[in-house]
Structures are given as structure tokens and as C-alpha cells.
Image (cartoon, rainbow, N blue to C red):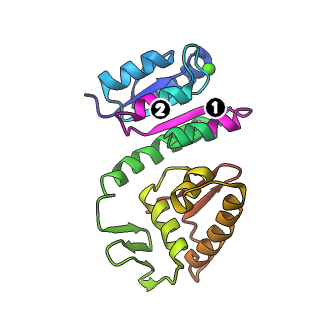
Amino acid sequence: MNKNTILVVEDDSTVRNLITATLKSHDYKYIVAENGESAIAMTATHNPEVILLDLGLPDIDGVQVIERIRSWSGVPIVVISARSEDNDKIAALDAGADDYITKPFSVAELLARVRVMQRRLAALSATEQPMFVNGSLRIDFASGTAYLAEEELHLTPIEYKLLCLLAQNAGKVLTHTYITQKIWGSSWENDVASLRVFMANLRKKLENEQGEQSFIQTHVGIGYRMLKVD
Ligand code: CA
């Protein structure tokens, strides 16, 4: 219904009030859920544009909330977690969350995440395209070729697969497990180690001569994300 509504799921009223005050002052429409079950119900009835989801909820686990919403909806989900919940954060991303923000966070940080999700939403409708363009980076999926500033990139098959995976999920944080599963079909410790090596090589090739235009963001201990640069 309301395409621009943000669903805020948070049981802690202090944090919830901070988030809603921030959204309100920036002209976002929002709705609020104080537990997991009502979050799922409100997602179905209100079709929010973005969900801001606290992981520690009084009724069901935040990761379960994501799994259930993901069974029918691709709505962008930003997880809000405490600093101590690193494993939960990874589980949430693997369950289909798009991004995370760690408490305590600033108002600017919160708004930046929401904007990334809105851009991701715009990019999603473009994923069926035969061509991916992000700043000076261009991928021609049909011919299996990538270009940087119209210069063909010489990528190994795995580097190309990695680049496509990141591009098709631009704006979303992909965990090490997710990436290694997609690329190698497994996620052993040594796959994650090889992933680091492949990623380092790929990034080197993506750096243009003027210096680093950073397309790939590293999330230490978690994974990688392709940033939308335009
Ligand atoms: Ca909580």
C-alpha cells in the first residue's frame, strides 16, 4: 500500500523513539512494531519499502523474522544489533538481511543506511538487465565481459563470478559463507581464505589508474558489499 513507509521493529522504546524521531524529521513515513509477530503481520499488510529490524525481540528471534518474511518478500531489511551480537549479525545476513547497523549508531548513519536500501531497491529492478553499470564499471552478462572505463578487464573465471555475484547484489552485504557457497558450493575455512585472495586480486584489477575508486567494501569478519558509486 504505502510504498514509502519504513517499518521500524524495536522493543526498546528509547531506541525506537530515536529512530522514529529521525525518520519523522526527514519526512519519512513509518510504522512501528514492538515484536516479531506483529512485524511479520505488518510487512504483509503494509508492504513497507524498508524494514529496520532489531534482532533481540521479546517473542521470536530476529533471524526467524527475516526467514519468515523472506519466504514471500524481498523487501530490504536492515538489521539493528548490539556490538556483542556479531554471530547473530552474520546469521541475519545469511537469512536474507541486506545490511546491518550496530548500536549505538548516529542519526546520520541510520539515514545513510536507509538511503543505501532505497538505491538498492532501484538497482533491484535493473537486475534483469543484460548489462550492469556502476560508475565506470560495466558488465556485459551476455558476453561474459567486464569493462572499467571502457577498458576490458582480464579476469579469471572465479574473479568474474565473484564480480557478477557482487554486482547482482549491489548494495547488499554478502557474508563469506554466502559467497563461498555460491562460488564453490561449500564454505570451509580454507574457502574463506581463498576468497580473501581472489577478492584482493579482483580489487586490484578494479582500481583505475587515477587511484582507488572503491567498488568493493570489506566488512571485517563478515563479508563484502559492492557499493553503488553513481
Ligand atoms: Ca531489543
Residue 159 magenta-highlighted: no
Task: Say which of 48 and 222 sits in front.
Answer: 222
Which residue in the structure is indicated by mark 1? 81
- Label pair 2/1, CB-CB below 8 angstroms: no
Q: Is residue 175 above or below residue 12?
A: below
Which residue in the structure is indicated by mark 2? 67
Q: Is residue 79 above or below residue 131?
A: above
Q: Is residue 105 visible?
A: no
Query: In this image, 213 relative to 149: left or right?
Result: right
Q: Quadrant of the N terminus?
A: top left
Q: Residues within 10 Å of mark 2 (few under 14, many from 20)?
A: some
Q: Would the CB of label 1 be found within 8 Å of ligand 1?
A: no
> Residue 50 location, x and y as percent?
41, 35
Residue 197: quadrant of the picture: bottom right
Q: Is residue 184 visible?
A: yes
Bounds of the magenta segment:
66-89
Tag of residue 179? none
Q: Amino acid at mark 2?
A: Glu
Task: Say which of 167 and 185 sits in front.
Answer: 185
Query: In this image, 171 relative to 72: left or right?
Result: right
Q: Is residue 229 above or below residue 100?
A: below
Q: Is residue 155 above or below residue 227?
A: below
